[in-house]
Image (cartoon, rainbow, N blue to C red):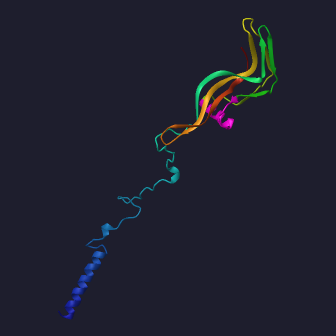
Amino acid sequence: MNAALSRACTAAVLTAFLTVGAGGAGTAFADDVPVVDADQDGNPIPQAPDDVDVDSSPVHTDGCLPDPGFSFSKVKSTFVGDKSKTVYGASGVTLSVSVAKGHTWTGTVSYAVKLSASVLVAAAEETISGSISYAKTTTVTLGGTWKVPSNQKDGWLALGSKGYSFNWERGSYNGGCKWIVSNHGTARLPALSPYIAHS
């Protein structure tokens, strides 16, 4: 092969290669190049939401309900009296009780292990009645008298308020959905306005 023919073939091959590589008549590689951040129609691809937009509510992996913290049972409406404002007497005796404005008395809580009464009261207020509290204060001066009936051996007259008595448990669920008690007891907590009762 002479030199002129060799140079002509080399030039033709080089021209054809450059044409294909440049995306000309032969686009062997052009379709394989991805378009960054664009959908098939050329529009930008929507980005994933930020972490704050993702629902991060805790999920109980074992399928149990979330731990309630407290459980209440045997809830009964009852009179919650003030021990310091309770008087007793025999049949036929007239009992009297009075209290000045601003007098405060508390309910009672028993427990197996020491705990903050405010935590229990808050749970009872949310679960049983929004009017439950640990203490009540009189906003007025009040008093009353009552005679123990002749057909009754003895009786009492007391200041207090209507409220609730109940049993309570504090605990949590384990991995097998079993309620594990960490503390328990009883409570008598005032709820309504000051009240005078007798029996």
Q: Position of residue 102 (x, y in %)?
A: 80, 27
User: In the image shown, does 169 or 105 lie closer to the viewer?
Assistant: 169
Q: Quadrant of the C terminus?
A: top right
Q: Is residue 63 above or below residue 132?
A: below
Looking at the rendering, which quadrant does residue 110 occupy?
A: top right
Q: Is residue 105 visible?
A: yes
The answer to whether residue 131 is visible is no
Give the vertical position of 105 relative to 158 (above or below). Answer: below
Residue 109 magenta? yes
Q: Residue at x 25, y 86 (%)?
A: 11
State yes or no: residue 57 in magenta. no
Q: Which residues are magenta?
A: 108-127
Q: Residue at x 21, y 92 (%)?
A: 4
- Residue drawn at (59%, 30%) of the image: 72
**Image quadrant where residue 17 sits:** bottom left
Front-most of 76 and 28?
Answer: 76
In the rendered image, the vertical position of residue 92 relative to residue 69, given as above or below? above
Quadrant location, the N terminus: bottom left
